[in-house]
Image (tube, helix red, strand yellow):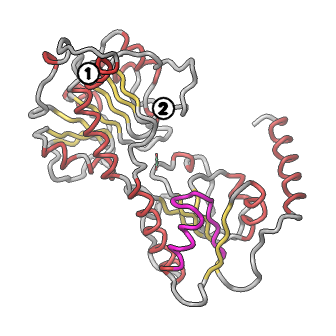
Amino acid sequence: MTPLFVWAQEQLCDLLGRSARRHPQAWEAGPKTRLLIENGCGASAEEWLSTLAQAFPGPEQPFQVRFVNNRLDRHQLLPEAQVYLTTHLCQRLLKRAPQLNWIHLAVGGVEFLEPLVIPAHVKITTAAGLSAAGIAEHVIGLIIALDRRFDLAFGRQRRGRWSQSGILEHIHTLRGKTLGILGMGHNGQALIPPARALGMRVIGFDKRGNLRLDGLEKLYGADGLPNLLRESDFVVVCLPLSKETHRIIGSEALAWMRPSAYLINVARGGLVDENALAQALRRRQIAGAALDVLTVEPPPRSHPLRGCPNLLITPHVAGNIYTFRKEIQQQFIENLKAYLKRGEYLQSELAFY
Ligand code: GLV
């Protein structure tokens, strides 16, 4: 961080602090747990209030809840909050929140935690896995769309053209094709049953090379990436983003893929080297790709993948289905009940801190 940036940040906090002193939102004094929710996190404030009222009926709730609608609210309320429901975290926020002892992150991918120092008494839970079924459906949709050249058919439809050329001869069945999954966490595992139901062979890559998973024909460990890529007709990236996995699909990995193979990324944009992928697509080194995530969302006009052939892009929607919101609320309520009983196990707690 440059000194100028730090100075500007301090000035802003100072300014916010001064206005915050005049800001009406505050915690009540007393022993009730102070629960802070970023507005729109998993539900609107009204939905959260009604979900909490249903889960904790009666005249007195054992907590007080406040919502963050803007920076001022956060500045004012975070220092005394004990429980924080959010989708993002940074060291600066943590520093300003010495009373926090449980943070629930209503997202699956939490790569932003990697550089942070989290105090040992702070429990972190996440929504990892909640949207796995939705993501699996999205991936199966993309596999079929790529294999059946829906992009060509729909493009022709929009232009009022009827032509089978380039589509009919392209269509194969998925039966017997190999699906290679990178990352056998919740999302990777959720792909096995639907792929098997389509008659696909499923193989996986995961650094925990000793997992036993029904329907998975083969699991490659840390040094098995080249083999998985050489064997797969469809490669699906479901890995968490970290220093270790950053740009794991680069020019070398793309060269290991078959010229007839497709790449699908539904995890994080940073797992794929987008310049290398653009080059591979333009040179027809692989058959095509489908991306639900990009390194910069939305992509700038100058993005290397703009205008690439045989590329389908969806705007980071694979996991964001309506039921996911309901499940976020349910998971949080169950965890809140356990938290209020003190010491009970919280679901989906990150264990590596
Ligand atoms: C969405 O991308 C998530 O990580 O939940």
- Residue at 45% from the left image edge and 59% from the top image edge: 325
Quadrant holding the N terminus: top right
Instruction: Report the magenta residues as a range.
Output: 34-53
What whole-number distance in Å separates the C-alpha atoms at marks 2 and 1?
A: 25 Å
Q: Position of residue 57 (x, y in %)?
A: 51, 86
Amino acid identity at mark 2: Leu
Q: Which residue is mark 1?
A: 153
Q: Which residue is mark 2?
A: 294
Q: Position of residue 319 (x, y in %)?
A: 40, 48
Q: Which mark is residue 139?
A: none
- Residue at 34% from the left image edge and 20% from the top image edge: 158
Numbered label tally: 2
- Residue at 29% from the left image edge and 32% from the top image edge: 225
* Whether the residue under disc 1 has CB within 8 Å of ligand 1: no
Q: Position of residue 15 (x, y in %)?
A: 88, 51
Q: Mark 2, mark 1: which one is toward the viewer?
A: 1
Say above or below: 40 vs 310. below
